[in-house]
Image: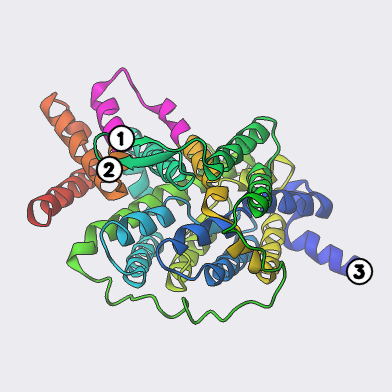
């Protein structure tokens, strides 16, 4: 036992990181409970695209488990991976529901976007490209996705409904489902304000428990079972069918969003852990980027949406997690969760809606970084963020943001502030609007 403990200590460099096995295990459990909500939210969202919820529950656990294990073992970082919020909603509610593509082709588009991110990582231009995009646009993209996700959350809880005269309107507040959705949201935010990290999971459990008594559509079918066959999802992604010129803009959007989301989270969590320098570099950075991007390719291929590093990893860091053992614990717990697949079908959409709105709040908070006094920076950031929910499309928000940035800088005599990557992206989107629409 002592030899095994000594090996673990050496492998994860406990002495250098000034941590212990107990601290790392507690950190891993903390991170897991702050992000395990994804195993309920992801099936709920992808289920709306026509995918089998119980299978998505299992594949979500699998890719989150193995991806996080790989991150811990190869990069020795306390960072967890799971399907990215935002991209899954974009896939289900825009690519499939709005544009009419099958989920197989839509997931194929996510696959090619993930391949693009992997190639950027392979050729070591990922951070160069990220650094080339102006802060205002990066912030606008993140905040816009937050607003977009929040709109979907309000819709799923029935608080916001369609209206032919005003486009949207307030839902029926006497509906128990709406009230349960609102309750779930406030449980999350109140607990988060009191620094209770597992607030999202607690909210889902409470609302689902109440729904069992108040909603006849919610039926209990057990807690534990052997995983179902994965044939309904795994192997069904249409990689070839997604290579359609009409999908190029969507593929590019998947790539761009995942680039900012995942890279930004890596920088933020490593900085909070005190293991990155002033330029954002950290030990085994190359290995972390490879695990992150390769997990995204594998995850989309098996039908779980793109995989990204999770900002909830910061919860484990805040209680002392400093090494890959934290991630290993998270990964093992995700794999054990596979045997609870009946719970995926039990959770109604309005029980996870509050989590979507809460994620929206976290993502929109970055707008504070915008230079609001400079309209050449503020205008593109605002347009990017506003156009995503108003057009119900992340792609259109990114497109209008880049185009407006070039227009504002050019028309105010500051064209030299626009670098080559921004011009390329803006011109590509202009060509899309002119020739495709």
- Answer whether residue 373 is magenta in the image: yes
Please tell me how crowded label 1 is: few (under 14), some (14-19), or many (20+) other residues with Cα within 10 Å. many
Image coords of residue 182 (percent x, y): 55, 37
Q: Earlier in the sequence, mark 2 or mark 3?
A: 3
Q: Distance between the Cα atoms at labels 1 and 2?
A: 7 Å
Separation of residues labelled 1 and 3 (CA atoms): 57 Å
Q: Is residue 140 left or right of residue 315?
A: left
Depth order, front residue of 36/326: 36
Q: Going 74% across and 56% down the picture, which residue do you hit? A: 13
Proximity of marks 1 and 3: CB atoms separated by less than 8 Å: no
The N terminus sits in image quarter? bottom right
| x then y, percent, for residue 218 | 60, 59
Residue 331 included in the magenta stretch of the image: no
Q: Position of residue 391 (x, y in %)?
A: 26, 43
Looking at the image, can residue 321 be seen?
A: yes
Which structural element holds mark 1? helix
Are the residues tagged 1 and 2 within 8 Å (C-beta)?
A: yes
In depth, the one of 192 and 315 nearer the eye is 192
Q: Quadrant of residue 5?
A: bottom right
Mark whose residue sits in front, 2 or 3:
2
- Label 2 crowd bin: few (<14), some (14–19), many (20+), radius 10 Å: many
Disc 2, SS: helix
Q: Is residue 306 visible?
A: no
Q: Nearer the viewer, mark 1 or mark 3?
A: 1
Q: Which residue is mark 3?
A: 1
Outermost residue, right side: 2
Which mark is drawn over residue 397?
Answer: 2
Residue at 27% from the left image edge and 34% from the top image edge? 166
């Amino acid at each position: 036992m002592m030899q095994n403990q000594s090996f673990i200590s050496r492998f994860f460099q406990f002495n250098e990181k000034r941590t212990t096995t107990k601290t790392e295990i507690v950190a891993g459990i903390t991170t897991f409970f702050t992000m395990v909500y994804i195993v309920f939210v992801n099936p709920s969202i992808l289920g709306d695209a026509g995918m089998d919820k119980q299978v998505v529950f299992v594949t979500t656990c699998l890719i989150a488990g193995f991806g996080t294990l790989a991150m811990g073992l190869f990069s020795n970082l306390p960072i967890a991976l799971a399907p990215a919020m935002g991209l899954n909603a974009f896939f289900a509610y825009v690519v499939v529901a709005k544009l009419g593509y099958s989920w197989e082709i839509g997931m194929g588009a996510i696959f090619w976007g993930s391949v693009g991110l992997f190639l950027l990582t392979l050729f070591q231009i990922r951070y160069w490209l990220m650094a080339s995009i102006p802060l205002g646009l990066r912030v606008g993209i993140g905040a816009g996705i937050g607003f977009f996700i929040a709109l979907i959350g309000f819709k799923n809880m029935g608080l916001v409904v369609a209206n032919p005269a005003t486009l949207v309107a307030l839902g029926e507040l006497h509906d128990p489902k709406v009230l349960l959705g609102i309750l779930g949201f406030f449980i999350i935010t109140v607990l988060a304000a009191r620094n209770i990290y597992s607030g999202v999971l607690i909210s889902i459990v409470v609302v689902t428990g109440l729904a069992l008594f108040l909603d006849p559509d919610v039926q209990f079918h057990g807690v534990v079972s052997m995983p179902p066959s994965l044939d309904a999802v795994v192997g069904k992604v249409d990689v070839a069918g997604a290579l359609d010129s009409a999908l190029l803009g969507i593929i590019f959007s998947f790539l761009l969003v995942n680039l900012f989301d995942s890279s930004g989270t890596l920088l933020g969590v490593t900085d909070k852990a005190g293991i990155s320098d002033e330029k954002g570099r950290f030990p085994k950075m190359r290995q972390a980027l490879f695990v992150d991007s390769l997990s995204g390719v594998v995850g989309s291929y098996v039908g779980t949406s793109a995989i990204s590093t999770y900002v909830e990893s910061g919860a484990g860091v805040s209680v002392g997690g400093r090494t890959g053992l934290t991630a290993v614990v998270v990964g093992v717990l995700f794999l054990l969760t596979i045997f609870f697949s009946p719970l995926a079908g039990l959770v109604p959409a309005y029980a996870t809606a509050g989590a979507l709105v809460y994620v929206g709040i976290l993502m929109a908070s970055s707008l504070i970084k915008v230079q609001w006094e400079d309209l050449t920076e503020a205008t593109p950031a605002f347009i990017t963020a506003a156009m995503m929910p108003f057009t119900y499309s992340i792609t259109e928000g990114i497109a209008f943001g880049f185009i407006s940035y070039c227009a504002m800088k050019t028309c105010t005599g500051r064209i030299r502030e626009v670098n080559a990557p921004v011009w390329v992206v803006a011109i590509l989107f202009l060509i899309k609007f002119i020739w495709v629409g």
